[in-house]
Image (cartoon, rainbow, N blue to C red):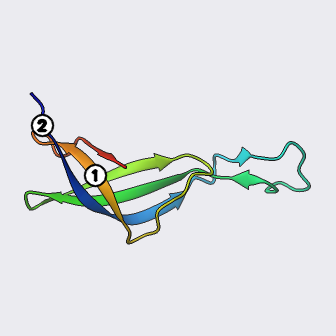
Amino acid sequence: MLSVQETMGTVVSVAKQWWLKVNTKPIRLHGLDGAVFPHVIKVKYTVDGIGYTKRKWIGAGKPVPPVGSSVKVIYHEDKPQKARVQ
């Protein structure tokens, strides 16, 4: 049976996905009027003294954690590289 563990990770980078624009207004006055963009965050976490990095895609308009903040990481005990960032 797979055992699920959790740890805290640190956000080390936040990148805006400029190539994927989501328009929130039906009528715009200029190209970026009402535009929101998704983000990709990179989280570093440590399990048993070994460091891992996980990327998470955050949809447009959702809150993005700032660089240096702590987030919860859930991972499988037998494969810590298989993780989910919450």
Q: How many marks?
A: 2
Tell me the residue at 79%/56% (across/down): 32
In primary-sequence order, the first of circles 2 and 1 is 2
- Kind of residue at disc 2: Ser
- The N terminus lies in which quarter of the figure? top left
Q: Position of residue 38 (x, y in %)?
A: 58, 50
Circle on res. 11: none
Residue type, label 1? Val
Q: Is residue 4 left or right of residue 22?
A: left
| Residue at the disc numbered 2 | 3
Q: Which residue is mark 1?
A: 73
The image position of residue 8, as x and y in percent, is: 25, 60
Local crowd size for mark 2, using a 10 Å CA cut-off: few (<14), some (14–19), many (≥20): few
Q: Is residue 31 above or below residue 68?
A: above
Left or right side of 12 for 60? right
Seen from the viewer's position, the closer of residues 54 and 5 is 5
In the rendered image, the vertical position of residue 3 relative to residue 48, given as above or below: above
Residue 19 at x, y percent in the picture: 63, 49
State the separation of the CA atoms marked 2 and 1. Answer: 14 Å
Of 3 and 47, the residue lying toward us: 3
Q: For mark 1, does the 10 Å Cα neighbourhood hold few (<14), some (14 to 19), or many (20 or more) residues?
A: many
Q: Residue at x 64, y 46 (%)?
A: 20
Q: Is residue 7 left or right of residue 72?
A: left
Front one among 19 and 36: 36
Task: Identify the residue shown where x is 46% and y is 63%.
Answer: 65
